[in-house]
Amino acid sequence: MDAETVKALAAIIAAAAALWGTYVFFSNSRLQRAKWLFELYEKFYESDDLKAIRETLDCEAGNSPHIEKLITDESAEFTDYLNFFEFVAVLKKLRQLTTDEIEGLFRYYLDCLQRSGQVRSYIAKKGYEHLDELLKGRANPR
């Protein structure tokens, strides 16, 4: 085998290794992303402190006495709930979450936040600017 053939074979092997490495990298990235989204899902749907707030905001008419009490009391659970969505909105802004991922995981509960004028006003006034921006950028709630 001459030197040119060896160089050509080495280039082919290097290209194949680079392609394989790229494939493995993206496969692992998708797996890591799926695990990360699952952890976000678990935090929101399985956390007891967020369940009570979800139930209160569960798309009642939007201006119920329960929601009014939630806003007036400003409980830690309520602010944790809003901070969770503020975090999601920041991740979207940083392009760590896509709109499809956010809508797929949290559409219903974002609709609930968006539907309540009292909650929307609270979000805008209390410094949840990323969440406010996320909600403004969504289509009308269903």
Image (cartoon, rainbow, N blue to C red):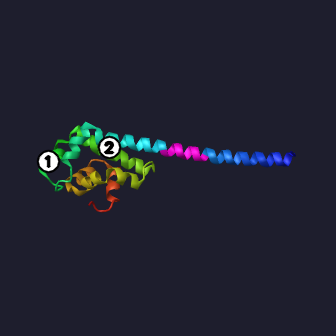
Residue 120, how many percent across, how many down?
25, 54
Q: Is residue 72 above or below residue 61?
A: above
The mark tally for this picture is 2
What secondary structure is the magenta-colored segment mainly? helix
Res. 121 mark: none
Q: Position of residue 101 (x, y in %)?
A: 39, 52
What segment carries the magenta color? 22-30
Helix, strand, or loop for circle 1?
helix
Which corner quadrant holds the N terminus?
top right
Q: Amino acid at mark 1?
A: His
Q: Residue at x 31, y 48 (%)?
A: 128
Taking the view exactly as shown, the residue that stands out farthest to the bottom is: 140
Q: Is residue 24 magenta?
A: yes
Q: What SS does tag 2 mark? A: helix
Identify the residue at image location x=42%, y=53%.
Answer: 98
Lower position in the chain sequence, tag 2 or tag 1? 1
- Extreme residue in the front direction: 1
Q: Which quadrant would residue 45 be assigned to in this image?
A: top left
Quarter where residue 136 is shown: bottom left
Q: Amino acid at mark 2?
A: Phe
Q: Residues within 10 Å of mark 2 (few under 14, many from 20)?
A: some
Percent from the top left, x then y, of residue 14?
A: 71, 45
Which residue occupies 31% across, 54% down? 107
Residue located beneath label 1 in the image: 66
Seen from the viewer's position, the closer of residues 25 and 93 is: 25
Q: Label 2 belongs to which residue?
A: 84
